[in-house]
Image (cartoon, grey):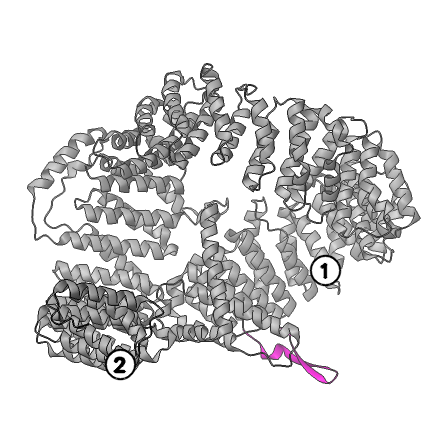
């Protein structure tokens, strides 16, 4: 391979072949050939020809990983020497070579010795090259490589950090700005991995220099450097902000635009990266930003531009544009200051959720005023800041929509509502701007605005529609702009009432129709969505009888443009689907006006039904048409369509099955032959494996029982009934599926089909219970059968009483096996709806069952008694109360009472409230915790009946001397809270604080139930407790501490066993903390919160599991705060993952430890989603520990795979 004398082409080809060889994994070089190859490549780097040099550099990458360590050092040495050469080309190629080598080194977390030695070698050479300051271009290259190396391998150079710092600091005053800029980049990467002493040195240096303020130019550089450090290592600079911020504020007042820009950028990085420490300074930052947002010293805005006559805005607009051109000043830097201010406000708004009301008072009007900004880049940032404000207002809706939260006067939403006219006025002018970017910003704004406040623009539609149409018609509009305009129009139509658009239909139809015909599929697709909304809203003349809007002039245009897209076979999938949906909507709402076009269109639907790609959308469209109030005649296509639909029920696509069942349910014009085809497909669908599909199948059968009762005759011996009986016995049957089942039985028995009468069905249901000697496998099955029996009995009132008598006889004979159980439950279910007081033996039977040996029979009897009482309160409620007072079986009777209070009507219960209350109070001090819990639930549910009287009474018992009574009362409150709005809410809100004061109760158990009640409130109705957090949180945190005095040793034979009585209490406290993350994050000081999470990471198994979950949530909710505490959080995670279980432990111990490890790893994977987390020295060390341990590495990989696939799935389903 003599490359010295050969021609350029030979050298080029030879180098290329060498590179191909080096890239193969199989290549093995002995020492001699290694030396030769390395020498050769280094020589080629000095080749006269640039292309050969480029190839040689590319060879370095694969070479580094293939040759021995000392060869790599040779390469690095040569490259470093060449970097200092006076030949520019050689210098450039060598610095690219060094970067290539650094890029190829294994990452710091792998702990490779090669990386460490190479980096040390390079560092020494680079620091001297930087310090010499002879040749600027050498310096720049060296700084660039230094930054690159610190970024990738910073952790390996810890010993060199002090010398790197002392070499970099003087460069901040270099006469060349480019050198300063690269030095700042290198320092930014240094602070991510350097030790604390180096960091303190750097900050002290910056503070001293800023304090001296020798000249403007260096001061600018120091401010930029501070901002860069804050951006890269905000979690470390926080404690110095007290000293830094006053200096930055001072420099804002110096008349130097560049310095101002850097100062405001520094504020932005503090706001984003040091949320806790910047908190006291936020008002100062906002006022500075508001001052400089309008800072435009060289431009005079005319006031008449702000006149109210918005309709003249078009002419004003022209003058405004014109005056803009006359003024030209290239040296004007003020726009950079304004841009920095807008971006900083954006940061403040995005990170300080708790200041929303304040933002709407001060920031919102200021931003709206600046929509007229003349620099396009600045304007985009102003819009972006306002978008952030709207987005912050949005997530809070769930609790703002609470009726009681609305009473607090000005909520952000009401404040925004009052500013809508001002926003619209500002946007109206911008919608006609020449600039595409500006108009896109306007559409984003409007879209976000109606998402936050649906219906807010009703009054303003006339002003906005012309602006939107302007962009649709504008020849110069880019396709993206049209797509944004259509998307915006779509959102506005969906969120506003139809009548608001009636006046604008003539103007809207032509541009929308034109967009449907646009050659670009994305525009067509958006336009079809708008067309569909046009049809649903303004054109649908059924919806509003009062409004005489006539859609006929527009039907033809809309139909023609849609049918063209519907017929096209070779278009984008999304357009196909939307054309089908849109046409379905047109026929559903306007089909009566299209008699000639209907048959042909339905045939196209039939074609689309046969195509696998479009079938699901077509089924939905047919469902829509079949349900139309216009009674569209689908008979022409049904003979062919229904067999196709029936075949879909066999397909392994759940969504298709569900939609097909819904379609069949609503198609009324089917013939018996078609029905038979569908019935044949039903049996496999009725099974416990998919309850939702079963439910849809059952509701289809119920519809058939009404429309085609004759078709059900074939059920009597068929599979469908066997499947039904199997489903009734499934422990999973509940909710909607159970309701559909009951409805079907009632519909079926009403058809009077031979072989499917009342007694036949009853035998089918109950037969298996009586014939089997053994009980059914699931208790739940008895309840479901009993509900079906009751449903049948309600549908056949004449045959009912006889059956009830039979059940009573069965119960009298024996309670053993399933017979008695089923009999009691059936009596309860029937008695709930039918008054059974005419059956004299009933009370005796049930009271006898209370003494049965079987727990199941006892609880069935207590349920039956309660349920029967609901059917006739005056007869049974006094009886239950009297039994509770006199008998020994309080627990069962109280359960009956709970059933009565939960299910009976409020008006029926009213007369008995006082007597029930008195009775319950006698039992709320019971020793038995189970009994107390039932009493508490009864008290809570009873309070809901008359909250004005009873809630204050509950509050009174908080003063009771008995801790049992106090815990019952606090638990009762838990049962008054539900996730739906209720009349008791405002009353509860006023006094829940008193109940939560029991968090300071001396009794352990009372404190625990107080936490459980608090958790329930935080989960179901956060508005109840949001205002109390300041006082509740300290007590909550107090309960997370391990208390030595609650830990005791118990001797169990030869073993000593420690018991921690405080564990349940701590667990309850951590559960509350987890709940607050979701509902009240903006009211929590996240750093105090993290302190307690950190303690929990070292606690007992159950609590560790909870805190690992919290860490994962926190990583996504407030990454910057977690980052500041990362080192303290990683340590306990690492301890958990490296703990070994004693070899002789029981199997459970090993399983527990495995679970803990997996959970801790989940937290680690979540932490690593924070971009800067892996730069932390402790974290990267932990990562290398994981990758070197086989077991941990396997867990880590599997969790990472799971989390990435879960993300993909959530994207699929959305």
Residue appearing at x 25%, y 29% in the figure: 473
Q: Residue furthest right?
A: 813
Residue 504, position in %: x, y? 33, 24
Element type where label 2 sits in the image: helix
The mark closer to the camera, 2 or 1, is 2
Residue appearing at x 55%, y 58% in the figure: 993
Task: Please name the residue that numbered disc 2 is placed on.
Answer: 32
Task: Please name the residue that numbered disc 1 is placed on.
Answer: 932
Residue 199, position in %: x, y? 28, 77
Q: Is residue 1134 above or below residue 538?
A: below
Looking at this view, is 978 or 584 the one in front? 584
Residue 168 visible to the viewer: yes
Q: Is residue 1145 left or right of residue 895?
A: left
Residue appearing at x 45%, y 16% in the figure: 593
Badges 2 and 1: C-beta atoms under 8 Å apart? no
Residue 215 visible to the viewer: no
């Amino acid at each position: 391979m003599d490359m010295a004398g050969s021609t350029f082409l030979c050298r080029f080809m030879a180098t290329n072949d060498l590179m191909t060889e080096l890239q193969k994994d199989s290549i093995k070089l002995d020492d001699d050939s290694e030396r030769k190859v390395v020498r050769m490549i280094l020589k080629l780097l000095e080749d006269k020809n640039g292309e050969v040099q480029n190839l040689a550099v590319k060879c370095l990458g694969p070479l580094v990983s293939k040759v021995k360590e000392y060869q790599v050092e040779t390469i690095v040495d040569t490259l470093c020497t060449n970097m200092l050469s006076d030949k520019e080309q050689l210098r450039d190629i060598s610095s690219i070579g060094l970067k290539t080598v650094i890029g190829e080194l294994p990452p710091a977390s792998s702990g490779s010795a090669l990386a460490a030695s190479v980096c040390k070698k390079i560092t020494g050479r680079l620091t001297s090259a930087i310090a010499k300051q002879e040749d600027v271009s050498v310096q720049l290259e060296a700084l660039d490589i230094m930054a690159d190396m610190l970024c990738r391998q910073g952790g390996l150079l810890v010993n060199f950090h002090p010398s790197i710092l002392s070499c970099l600091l003087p460069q901040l005053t270099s006469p060349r700005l480019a050198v300063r800029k690269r030095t700042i980049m290198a320092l930014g990467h240094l602070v991510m991995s350097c030790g604390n002493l180096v960091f303190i040195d750097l900050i002290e240096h910056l503070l001293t220099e800023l304090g001296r303020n020798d000249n403007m130019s260096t001061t600018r550089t120091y401010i930029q450097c501070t901002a860069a450090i804050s951006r890269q290592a905000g979690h470390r600079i926080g404690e110095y902000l007290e000293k830094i911020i006053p200096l930055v504020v001072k420099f804002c007042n110096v008349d130097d635009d560049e310095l101002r820009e850097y100062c405001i950028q520094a504020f932005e990085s503090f706001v984003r990266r040091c949320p806790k420490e910047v908190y006291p300074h936020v008002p100062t930052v906002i006022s500075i930003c508001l001052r400089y947002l309008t800072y435009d010293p060289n431009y005079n805005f005319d006031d008449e531009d702000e006149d109210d006559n918005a309709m003249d805005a078009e002419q004003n607009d022209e003058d405004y544009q014109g005056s803009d051109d006359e003024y030209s000043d290239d040296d004007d830097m003020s726009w950079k200051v304004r841009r920095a201010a807008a971006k900083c406000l954006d940061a403040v708004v995005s990170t300080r959720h708790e200041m929303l009301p304040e933002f709407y008072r001060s920031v919102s009007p200021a931003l709206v005023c600046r929509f007229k900004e003349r620099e396009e880049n600045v304007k985009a940032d102003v819009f972006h800041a306002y978008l952030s404000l709207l987005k912050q207002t949005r997530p809070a809706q769930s609790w703002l929509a609470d009726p009681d939260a609305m009473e607090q006067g000005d909520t952000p939403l009401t404040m925004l509502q009052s500013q809508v006219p001002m926003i619209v006025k500002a946007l109206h002018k911008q919608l006609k701007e020449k600039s595409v970017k500006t108009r896109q910003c306007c559409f984003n704004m409007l879209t976000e605005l109606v998402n936050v406040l649906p219906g807010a623009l009703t009054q303003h539609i006339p002003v906005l529609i012309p602006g939107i149409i302007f962009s649709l018609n504008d020849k110069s509009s880019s396709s993206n702009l049209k797509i944004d305009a259509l998307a915006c129009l779509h959102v506005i139509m969906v969120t506003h009432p139809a009548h608001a658009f009636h006046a604008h239909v003539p103007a809207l139809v032509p541009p929308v129709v034109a967009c449907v015909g646009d050659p670009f599929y994305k525009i067509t697709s958006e336009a079809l969505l708008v067309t569909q909304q046009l049809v649903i809203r303004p054109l649908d003349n059924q919806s509003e009888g009062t409004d005489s809007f006539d859609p006929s002039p527009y039907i033809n245009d809309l139909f023609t443009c849609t049918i063209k897209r519907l017929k096209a076979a070779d278009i984008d999938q999304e357009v196909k689907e939307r054309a089908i949906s849109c046409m379905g909507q047109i026929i559903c709402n306007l089909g009566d006006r299209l008699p000639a076009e209907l048959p042909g269109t339905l045939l196209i639907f039939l074609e689309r039904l046969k195509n696998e790609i479009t079938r699901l959308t077509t089924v939905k469209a047919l469902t829509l048409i079949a349900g139309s109030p216009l009674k569209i005649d689908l008979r022409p296509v049904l003979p062919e369509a229904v067999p196709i639909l029936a075949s879909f029920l066999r397909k392994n696509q759940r969504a298709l099955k569900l939609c097909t069942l819904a379609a069949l349910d609503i198609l009324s014009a089917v013939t018996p032959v078609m029905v038979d085809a569908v019935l044949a497909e039903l049996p496999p669908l009725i099974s416990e494996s998919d309850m939702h599909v079963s439910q849809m199948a059952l509701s289809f059968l119920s519809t058939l029982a009404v429309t085609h009762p004759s078709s059900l005759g074939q059920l009597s011996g068929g599979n469908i009934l066997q499947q039904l009986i199997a489903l009734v016995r499934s422990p999973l049957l509940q909710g909607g599926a159970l309701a559909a089942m009951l409805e079907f039985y009632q519909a079926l028995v009403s058809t009077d089909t031979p072989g499917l009468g009342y007694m036949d069905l009853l035998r089918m249901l109950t037969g298996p219970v009586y014939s089997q000697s053994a009980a059914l496998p699931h208790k739940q099955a008895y309840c479901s059968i009993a509900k079906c029996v009751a449903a049948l009995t309600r549908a056949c009132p004449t045959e009912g009483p006889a059956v009830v008598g039979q059940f009573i006889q069965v119960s009298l004979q024996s309670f053993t096996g399933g017979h008695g159980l089923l009999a009691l439950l059936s009596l309860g279910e029937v008695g709930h709806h039918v008054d059974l007081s005419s059956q004299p033996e009933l009370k005796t039977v049930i009271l006898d069952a209370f003494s049965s040996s079987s727990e199941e029979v006892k609880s069935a009897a207590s349920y039956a008694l309660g349920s029967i009482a609901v059917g006739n309160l005056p007869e049974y409620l006094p009886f239950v109360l009297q039994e509770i007072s006199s008998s020994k079986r309080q627990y069962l009777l109280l359960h009956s009472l709970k059933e009565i209070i939960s299910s009976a009507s409020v008006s029926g219960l009213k007369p008995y409230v006082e007597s029930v209350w008195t009775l319950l109070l006698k039992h709320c001090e019971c020793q038995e915790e189970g009994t107390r819990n039932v009493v508490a639930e009864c008290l809570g549910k009873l309070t809901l009946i008359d909250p004005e009287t009873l809630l204050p009474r509950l509050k009174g018992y908080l003063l009771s001397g008995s801790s049992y009574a106090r815990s019952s009362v606090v638990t009762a409150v838990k049962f008054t809270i539900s996730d739906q709005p209720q009349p008791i809410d405002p009353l509860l809100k006023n006094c829940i604080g008193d109940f939560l004061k029991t968090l300071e109760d001396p009794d352990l158990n009372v404190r625990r139930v107080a936490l459980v009640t608090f958790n329930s409130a935080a989960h179901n109705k956060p508005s109840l407790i949001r205002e109390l957090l300041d006082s509740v949180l300290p007590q909550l945190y107090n309960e997370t501490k391990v208390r030595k005095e609650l830990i005791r040793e118990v001797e169990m034979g030869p073993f000593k066993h420690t018991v921690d009585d405080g564990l349940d209490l701590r667990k309850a406290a951590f559960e509350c903390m987890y709940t607050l993350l979701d509902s009240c994050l903006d009211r929590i000081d996240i750093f105090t919160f993290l302190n307690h999470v950190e303690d929990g990471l070292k606690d007992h198994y159950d609590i560790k599991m909870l805190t690992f979950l919290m860490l994962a949530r926190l990583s996504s909710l407030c990454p910057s705060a977690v980052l500041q505490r990362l080192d303290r959080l990683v340590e306990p995670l690492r301890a958990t993952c490296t703990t070994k279980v004693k070899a002789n432990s029981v199997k459970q111990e090993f399983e527990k430890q495995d679970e803990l490890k997996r959970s801790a790893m989940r937290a680690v994977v979540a932490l690593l989603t924070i971009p800067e987390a892996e730069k932390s020295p402790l974290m990267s060390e932990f990562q290398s520990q994981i990758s070197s341990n086989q077991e941990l590495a396997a867990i880590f990989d599997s969790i990472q795979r799971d989390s990435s696939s879960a993300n993909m799935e959530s994207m699929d389903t959305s």
